[in-house]
Each structure stands twice: as C-alpha cells, then as structure tokens.
C-alpha cells in the first residue's frame, strides 16, 4: 500500500433528500445515516427508490431538495469523480475491449494517480477479490461471477471511503450468489473502515450482510434497524412481511390489560400504548407458532401441508383466517382436514398499527 491515501472513515448522511422525475417524486425526504464502517442495506421492492438514493450519493442524480453528506462534507453539488466513492452495479459494466488489469486501472488513471503506483494498486485490488491470476484476460473470457469480482476490484482500487453496491449479485445464479455473499462479508472484514450502502430487493442478502437495514417502499423510508430488530420488532406490516415471514392477524384491542380480540377469541399479547377498541394487526412469525395446546391456543383445520425437510409448514384455517405454522418435521405427515390446535407465547407477538401496508398503497406515488 502507498499508505495515507485511503479516505478517512466517512459515513453517509441523507438529510431530507428528495428526487423527482418530471414532477413524480421517486425519493421522498429520505433521512438516513450510514455510520463510518457500517454496512447499510437499502431493502425494498422494485421501484421503491433504492437505486435513486444510491445515485444521489454517487452524484449521478441531483436532489430536488435536501443535502447529501460524506462524513461532514456536504457533497450535494460535487461531481461524481470528486466524491471518493466506489460503485458496483448489477451489470458488471466492464469495458469489453480492455483487459482485466486495465479495467481495474481505469479509475486510477482517471483520478491521476501517479503512473508507477498503478500496477501495485491494481494487483492489490485484484488480490482482494481473488482474481490476481486473471489480470490479462478480457471480460468475455470470464464468468459472470468473475466479472463481478473484477467490477468490485475496480471500485476498491481507488481506495474509496464509501462503497456503493446496487444489486451486485442479482445477475448471478443462486449458488454463486451465496458464495459471493460470503466473499463480500470477508471483504468488509478486511476493509472495516469502508462504509457500504448495499441496495437489494433480497431479504436474505440484507439479513446476511447488513449491520442495519433501511426498508424502503413507495419512495419512502419505512423502517430502519438491525436485522434482529426488524425481524423481532417490526414497526409496520410492510416490514413484517418483507423481512421474514409473518402471520398478520386482524385484531381489536380489548378492554382487559394486554388482551386483544381475534376472531371472537381473547389473546394475551403486549398491547403497549394501543387504545381500547382500536383495530390493529398482530404479527406472529410462523416458526414461533407451536402445534398443540399452550398459551393463546387457536383451534382450526389444516388446509395445506408443505414438507420442507427439517420442518413442516402447516396452513391452518381459523374461522376464515389462514395461519401459518413452521413446526419441526413431524413423524407422521398431518392430514388435510384434521382439526389441530396452535399456540404462541405472548412475548412472541408484536402488535402493529392496522393496515399500515395496505393504507399506503393504492396510488402510484405515495
Ligand atoms: N431516469 C429516470 N427517469 C424517470 N423515472 C425514473 C428514472 N430513474 C428511475 N425512475 C423511476 O423512479 C422510481 C424509482 O426507481 P429506482 O430508484 O430505480 O427504484 P429501485 O431501485 O428501488 O427499483 C421508479 O418508478 C422508476 O421508474
Ligand atoms: Mg434499483
């Protein structure tokens, strides 16, 4: 390493950033901070504004309002090449007529790094992604996964303080993807000062890689927290259903303390500040629903059984509501139409505002 040149630890901060295309707001007052050295996943369905947010950090899109900071530097008006950012997109975007080493050197030349220092920097970057042996090849002589490694090396060669990754694995097949996920995690361990903003629509990638996940939907930030937080304590129906699997049961907050009404049954769950008589949604993860008698027992009829190797997924009809239970593989496969009892512990249930997810829908823009 030439030393001293790698950018100082600099997080990313969106301050009320909005982006509009032809009067259509596609990013709506985003407030989000990525701490120095943190991996933040931007997770959301297609069209939710993730790429737009990333491009605002890179400088390829100008916000209609709001500011973007790298560390304490306001970069909102700065051209992309002056931001010290490395970026990798879904379609490798390597120059086809250039050898691997020249692709990786490209950003260094553009940034006027001293010529005699370039080969060392290229070698270092290729080494980091395990592609040192491929320096002389052309992109067409590489597999998709290898091309994406080169793209990552190219981004790392400039020794960025901030790395932006936009669905970097989505063009790869499932097996390659899981290998690359592990590689990205290792890379981050080797570069603990680099802040990473990782755009994905894949919850497994977000749960695996991210220190925190920012959940996007319909141009807005819906939720933000550690993977465990969002999984155990989602704050909206959208998060509950997008991060992990969820039973979302319509309930009414009952008069008694910590009691709700579900399909004519009283269930004991923490109701927090919710007011009596309010409609709400109860979130219970399928793997926390048990088979047999217990607290919050619910009787119903099995309507579907899926064998998933180590578990059985049961779909149980409870007065017209479909409840999913993932139970340890059963010795005897349950029979459709059987009456069963399900149960769950009060502390495994989370009460959410009713219809938050549906309520936000309808229109195309917010
Ligand atoms: N250059 C553009 N011109 C017009 N509309 C755009 C442009 N880029 C993105 N959009 C629109 O902005 C919305 C958000 O897009 P994007 O940020 O790419 O979403 P995501 O990455 O979450 O799939 C989409 O509705 C998309 O069609
Ligand atoms: Mg996108």
Image (cartoon, rainbow, N blue to C red):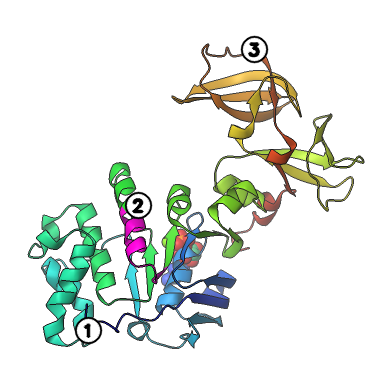
**Residue at 33% across, 60% down:** 90
| Above or below: residue 208 compared with residue 32 | above
Q: Measure the alpha-carbon separation of dots 2 and 1.
A: 29 Å
* Depth check, front residue: 303 or 202: 202
Q: How many discs mark residues in the rendered view?
A: 3
Position of 345 with respect to 114 (left or right) is right
Q: Residues within 10 Å of mark 3 (few under 14, many from 20)?
A: few
Residue occupying the point 63% across, 58% down: 363
Task: Give 167 or 205, whichever is nearer the viewer.
Answer: 205
N-terminal of the two: label 2 or label 1?
1
Is disc 3 placed on a helix, strand or loop?
A: loop
Above or below 336: residue 19: below
| Magenta range | 183-195
Locate residue 241, reporting x and y percent.
59, 45
Q: Which residue is mark 2?
A: 181
Picture coordinates of residue 159, whole percent (x, y)? 29, 76
Image vertical order of residue 298 relative to residue 352, above or below: above
In the picture, measured across the screen, residue 347 lies left or right of residue 188, that is right
Element type at mark 2? helix
Name the residue tied to disc 1.
110
Find numbered disc 1 in the image and state the secondary structure of the residue it sits on. Answer: helix
Residue 194 forms part of the magenta stretch: yes
Whole-angstrom CA distance, mark 1 to mark 3, is 69 Å
Q: Which residue is mark 3?
A: 338
- 13 or 278: which is nearer to us? 13
Q: What residue occupies the far right of the structure in this picture?
A: 255
- Residue 211 lies within the magenta run: no
> In front of the other: label 2 or label 1?
2
């Amino acid at each position: 390493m030439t030393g001293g040149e790698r950018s100082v630890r600099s997080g990313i901060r969106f301050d009320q950033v909005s982006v509009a295309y032809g009067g259509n707001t596609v990013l709506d007052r985003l407030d989000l901070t990525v701490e120095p050295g943190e991996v933040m996943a931007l997770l959301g369905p297609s069209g939710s504004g993730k790429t737009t947010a990333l491009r605002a950090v890179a400088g390829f899109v100008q916000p209609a309002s709001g500011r973007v900071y790298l560390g304490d530097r306001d970069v909102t008006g700065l051209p992309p090449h002056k931001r010290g950012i490395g970026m990798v997109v879904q379609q490798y975007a390597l120059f086809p007529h250039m050898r691997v080493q020249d692709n990786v050197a490209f950003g260094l030349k553009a940034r006027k790094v001293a010529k005699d220092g370039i080969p060392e920097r290229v070698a270092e970057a290729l080494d980091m992604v395990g592609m040192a042996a491929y320096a002389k090849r052309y992109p067409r002589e590489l597999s998709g996964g290898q091309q994406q490694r080169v793209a990552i090396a190219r981004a790392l060669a400039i020794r960025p303080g901030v790395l932006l990754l936009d669905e970097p694995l989505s063009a790869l097949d499932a097996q390659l993807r899981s290998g690359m996920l592990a590689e990205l995690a290792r890379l981050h361990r080797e570069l603990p000062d680099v802040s990473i903003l990782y755009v994905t629509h894949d919850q497994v990638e977000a749960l695996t890689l991210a220190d925190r996940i920012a959940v996007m939907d319909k141009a807005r930030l819906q939720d933000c927290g550690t993977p465990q937080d969002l999984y155990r304590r989602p704050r909206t129906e959208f998060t509950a259903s997008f991060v992990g699997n969820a039973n979302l049961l319509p309930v009414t907050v009952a008069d008694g303390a910590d009691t709700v009404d579900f399909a004519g049954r009283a269930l004991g769950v923490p109701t927090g500040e919710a007011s009596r008589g309010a409609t709400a949604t109860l979130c219970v993860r399928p793997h926390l629903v048990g088979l047999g008698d217990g607290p919050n027992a619910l009787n119903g009829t099995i309507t579907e059984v899926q064998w998933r190797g180590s578990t059985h997924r049961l779909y149980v009809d409870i007065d017209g509501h479909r409840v999913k239970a993932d139970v340890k593989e059963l010795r005897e496969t349950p029979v459709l139409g059987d009456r069963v009892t399900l149960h769950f512990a009060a502390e495994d249930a989370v009460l959410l505002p009713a219809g938050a997810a549906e309520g936000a829908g309808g229109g195309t823009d917010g």
